[in-house]
Image (cartoon, coloured by chain):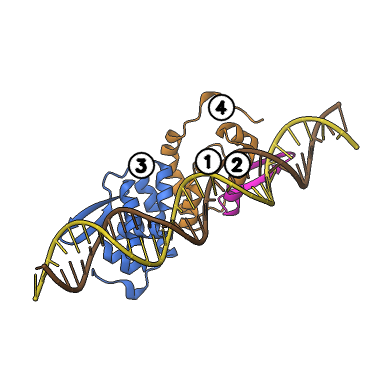
Chain colours: A orange, B blue, C yellow, D brown
Amino acid sequence: MTPLQLCKCLADETRLKIVMRVRQHGELCVCDLVDTLGQPQPTVSRHLAQLRDCGLLAVRKDAQWVYYRLHEGLPQWAQEVLQSLQAPAAKQFPVKPEQRSGCC
Amino acid sequence: MTPLQLCKCLADETRLKIVMRVRQHGELCVCDLVDTLGQPQPTVSRHLAQLRDCGLLAVRKDAQWVYYRLHEGLPQWAQEVLQSLQAPAAKQFPVKPEQRSGCC
DNA sequence: CCATTACATTCGGATATCCGAATATACAGG
DNA sequence: CCTGTATATTCGGATATCCGAATGTAATGG
């Protein structure tokens, strides 16, 4: 995970939202992200695959659900970047109240 | 300056190098960046224009030289992001000794 | 088995991004 | 003026990125 790779991962609105939301919640399943982001499932899934492939997110499968979380092995500097982005990103992409659902 | 805009600005190797180097040195002229990065002058100039247009860099002209620096008005969170990226970015893009020139 | 739900992947095309080459501008010195 | 240096901009074309639509897969429940 290089600085350049991290920046590229976060240089897309959907991926940035995903990472910030996963960071906030600790762990989220795909269908929750699909509901929250209002993007079609294949789109979300593709972005999740990208974030997983570059080592930003880790996966856990439970029955038919797939849960994504921040990868524990993220280097310190990367975690600091995400922390610095958290507050302004939350302001930039506010979650509409009716989207605060539980899981699917 | 939104988190998304910042990430897009840094999601290119040349621009990331420019920002990190400008941050390290406080102020750099274009020809110094051209020498250091080993990229053609129009390429560097285009990236500088992008970084200037999105508010990351500020400009000062002195005779025939143009000096770029980090924009003073950068929000706190953005400065923190750059600080977190500094160390690993320096490791990712080491400056070759013979490139440590003065100005042109 | 069959249908449904959750998720992933593939394929093509649209769009954005990046770069090389050429050209423009501005200034400094002879 | 004329030349050289420093920088910016424009124009195409190449390449990368993103997305919609369709399809695949795995598990679950009847």
Callout 1: chain: A
Is residue A71 shown to the viewer in this render? no
Determine which residue is flagged by label 3. Answer: B1
Q: Is residue B6 magenta?
A: no
Determine which residue is flagged by label 2. Answer: A43
- What is the three-letter code of the residue carrying label 1? Thr
Residue at position x 61%, y 35% from top?
Answer: A34
Query: Residue A42's spot in the image, x, y percent?
Result: 64, 41
Instruction: Assess whether mark 2 and mark 3 are in contact (beta carbons under 8 angstroms).
Output: no
Q: Which residues are magenta?
A: A49-70
Q: Residue furthest top?
A: A98
- What is the three-letter code of the residue carrying label 3? Met
Disc nearest the viewer among 4 and 2: 2
Determine which residue is flagged by label 1. Answer: A14
Is B24 displayed left or right of B8 in the figure? Answer: left
Q: Is residue A58 magenta?
A: yes
Q: Nearer the viewer, residue D9 or D17?
A: D9
